[in-house]
Image: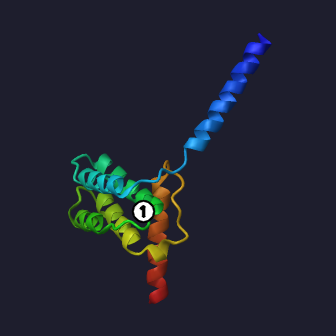
Amino acid sequence: MKKILMKALVLVLLLSVNTELFAQIPVLNKRDLKIAEINSIASLDNENNMIVESAIFNLLIFKDRYPEWNFNNITEKLNQLSVEGNSIVIRYKAQLTSIYLTNPSMFDSLKITEKENPAKYFRQIAEKVENNLVATN
């Protein structure tokens, strides 16, 4: 019985090590990035507010992982949402995300590491924008 438990423990440890090794950020080619952009814009057009909010947060992650990507098409859609979004939350998050995408140097220290806590990052973006406004006045 002890041998079986020991083998099972070793197997679980090996699987967990492999899972960690393969959980790295994928490197996407331009075609895949373009597909991600198209899907993001489609998600921003969704009638379900939760899908739109999720898509907005995913754009923060997308920019963090692929900072060299041209986000002009997405920024146009976010600017539209910041005026015409279905809720004040969507309008606010769309505006913050647009600022994040178009002013990367302002957010050099911001790294998106926790996918479970989007409010934390929107709060940090808002604080950076506010601090920048106060500093310039």
Which residue is depicted at the point 48% across and 50% down?
Answer: 26
**Amino acid of disc 1:** Lys
Looking at the image, what colour scheme do you see?
rainbow
Residue reaching furthest right? 2
SS at circle 1: helix
- Which residue occupies the foreground of this view, 32 or 129? 32
* Image x and y of residue 69, in percent: 38, 65
- Which residue occupies the foreground of this view, 32 or 57? 32
- Which quarter of the figure has residue 13? top right
* Image x and y of residue 6, in percent: 76, 20
Could you classify mark 1 by the number of other residues whose Cα lies within 10 Å: few (under 14), some (14-19), or many (20 or more)? Answer: some
Q: Which quadrant: the C terminus?
A: bottom left
Q: Mark 1 points at which residue?
A: 63
Q: Which quadrant: the N terminus?
A: top right
Q: How many marks do you count on the picture? A: 1
Which residue is depicted at the point 67% across and 25% down?
Answer: 11
Q: Is residue 129 left or right of residue 13?
A: left
* Image x and y of residue 19, in percent: 58, 37
Which residue is depicted at the point 47% across and 83% down?
Answer: 134
- Which residue occupies the foreground of this view, 93 or 19? 19
